[in-house]
Image (cartoon, helix red, strand yellow):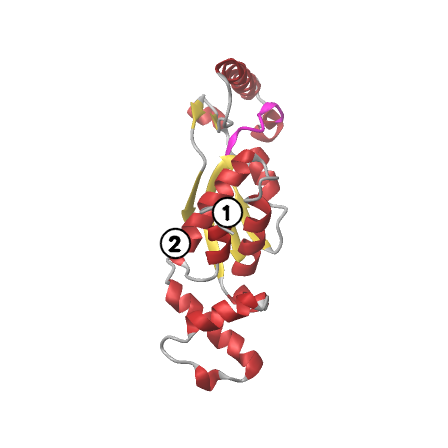
Amino acid sequence: MRIVPLSVTLEDKLDGMEILKKIERMGRTCYKSEDKITDDSATKFVRQRLDEKHVSVIEHVSVTVRIICNRGLSHEIVRHRIGSYSQESTRYCNYNKASEITVIKPTGLTTQQETIWSLAMTAAQERYLDLIDLGCSPQVARGVLPIDLKTEICVTYNLRTWRWFFTQRCSPAAHPQMQELAKNTLDLLSAHIPVVFDDLAKKYIWGLE
């Protein structure tokens, strides 16, 4: 059994200012104010649209990330719309080839809890490998795999959907590991794209209202 951490990486090369300029070009169509576009007008324009809750204009830009998490978190992620997903499939991936499964350890376990969790993961691994050895296909043997099995999922959302994702999944009401994953993703996107996520980063990462 192999344990790996949660992770998120960008699949796009992002130019934050070019993204803002594209949003401005699309958004000014609504007002037929393209003549007001200047070299430095995009930042102010996008900020004003967000302040006015005119967020449809940011749907013109999408960003893809690659997430490594457990199956439980991936089940929550794919409930978000509108989005596109490509996920590691337990129907077709045969973990017998590596002679082990890869899992994500829950956060906050006590020593005793971690011992019990490790025993459960090891037992699931052994039963899965036994089933494969006995001729079961991966899509049948996967029935004994745990929710904490590591999965890899590519997620594409437009910027408006990313904002909604962060609002829901950075919340204290979200699963602790989902909060960790969402905040890491928010930190990543806000570092590359000016303005669009500033208010959410301020609230959920910096703890400022």
Closest to the observer, 131 or 62 = 62
Q: Position of residue 119 (x, y in %)?
A: 52, 14
The segment highlighted magenta reads 143-152
Closest to the observer, 92 or 100 = 100
Q: Where is residue 31 in the image (x, y as percent from the top left)?
A: 56, 82
Is 68 displayed left or right of 167 in the figure? left
Between label 2 and label 1, give the one nearer the viewer. Answer: 1
Label 2 crowd bin: few (<14), some (14–19), many (20+), radius 10 Å: some
Image point (62%, 53%), residue name:
81
Tell me the kind of residue under disc 2: Ala
Callout 2 secondary element? helix
Closest to the observer, 205 or 36 = 205
- Give the alpha-carbon distance from disc 2 to disc 1, as whole Å: 14 Å
Residue bearing mark 1 = 204
Mark 2 / mark 1, whichever is N-terminal: 2
Magenta residue check for 179: no
Position above or below: 124 against 156: above
Callout 1 secondary element? helix
Tell me the kind of residue under disc 1: Tyr
Residue bearing mark 2 = 191
Magenta residue check for 149: yes
Label 1 crowd bin: few (<14), some (14–19), many (20+), radius 10 Å: many
Q: Where is residue 131 in the image (x, y as percent from the top left)?
A: 57, 19
Is 63 displayed left or right of 13 in the figure? right
Position above or below: 4 against 24: above
> CB of mark 2 within 8 Å of CB of mark 1?
no
